[in-house]
Image: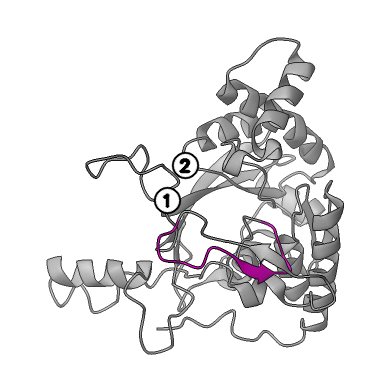
Amino acid sequence: MSDPPYGIDFKGIRWDGATIRETAARRTGRRLTSGQAFAAWTQAWASEARRVLKPGAHAVVFGAPRTFHRLACGLEDAGLDVRDVLCWMYGTGVPKSRRLPGGRSTTLKPAWEPILLTRRPTAGTVDANLDRYRTGELNIDAARIDGRYPPNVALGHSANCTADTCTPDCAAALIDRAAAATLSPASTAQRTSRIFWSTKATRAERDAGLDHLPARAFDLFPDAPRRPRTRAARNPHPTVKPLALMRWLVRLTVPDGGLVLDPFTGSGSTGCAAVLEGRRFIGIEIDPAYARVATARLRHWDRQAADPGPFDRCRR
């Protein structure tokens, strides 16, 4: 389970663009387009991940809307079967494009991320694989939403939603209002957004357990209008995933007491979710600064593992 670089040159960071292209060129010995390079690079690391996965084990990988087709190709070329594509929708986020005169731009506002659900092929039938390895199935009951079968869509509530009200930019509230305006009362008796929800990671969640680390200026929304340009943060990773979402994915795909591997640990959200859900964890991270943050967050949430807190409650 991992949130690897997306190959989109995010904020001009080398690890999300130039490094991927250079690594793929060295491995293949030829010039590649950025999409070809991303697929080749994905195949390289995913092949190593497949090597250590048990037959039937799932690999859950985040991607970007404009490159996840290459991500899927790389995962398939590494020998993994694509089982589904989950959609994580959220209301927050700002366009990354430069504003042009006349109300024009070159991109849309980001509002969803694909999550590739893949699996190493089973050894024989699923039943035989389960008997030998305890892998190959999804933990449906552990991931039910309001008692319902888990879907392949997750909604991102805004961080300021409460148990009684949602903020105007909340994706779930927007969907419910649109449904109420177009469907009959009988059709909306069960709210449209009753599927899984998760806010984006708040600053408090990002920095939990990091009081001993130095804070530095960091802006989560550098392109947003009318926002403070900088605020102090101890976790500088730009793409921290919310623990509620990661915990749901762990429950869905990893057997009780199973082992979670994250080859791109970053600031450790996957590992924090794993320990909170009673799973073992191995993380790999090349950046020493991120490794320090991840280690501290893992220690913090490991101490909290006995108290599930608010993560499993739907705030409406």
Q: Based on the displayed image, in which of its 4 quarters is residue 16 positioned?
A: top right
Please name the residue that numbered disc 2 is placed on. Answer: 65
> What amino acid is labelled 2 in the image?
Pro
Query: Is 250 positioned to the left or the right of 82 in the image?
Result: right
Residue pictured at 62% horizontal, 55% vertical? 239
Query: Are there few (<14), some (14-19), or many (20+) residues within 10 Å of tag 2?
Result: some
CB-based contact (under 8 Å), mark 1 and mark 2: yes
Q: Residue 31: give x, y in percent of width and height.
A: 66, 11
User: Mark 1 against mark 2, which lies toward the viewer?
Assistant: 1
Please name the residue that numbered disc 1 is placed on. Answer: 110
Coloration mode: one colour
> What amino acid is labelled 1 in the image?
Pro
Q: Is residue 152 above or below residue 272?
A: above
Tell me, yes or no, if residue 271 can be seen here: yes
Residue pictured at 22% horizontal, 75% vertical? 188
SS assignment at label 2: loop
> What residue range appears in magenta?
224-237
Q: Based on the displayed image, in which of its 4 quarters is residue 247 positioned?
A: bottom right
SS assignment at label 1: loop
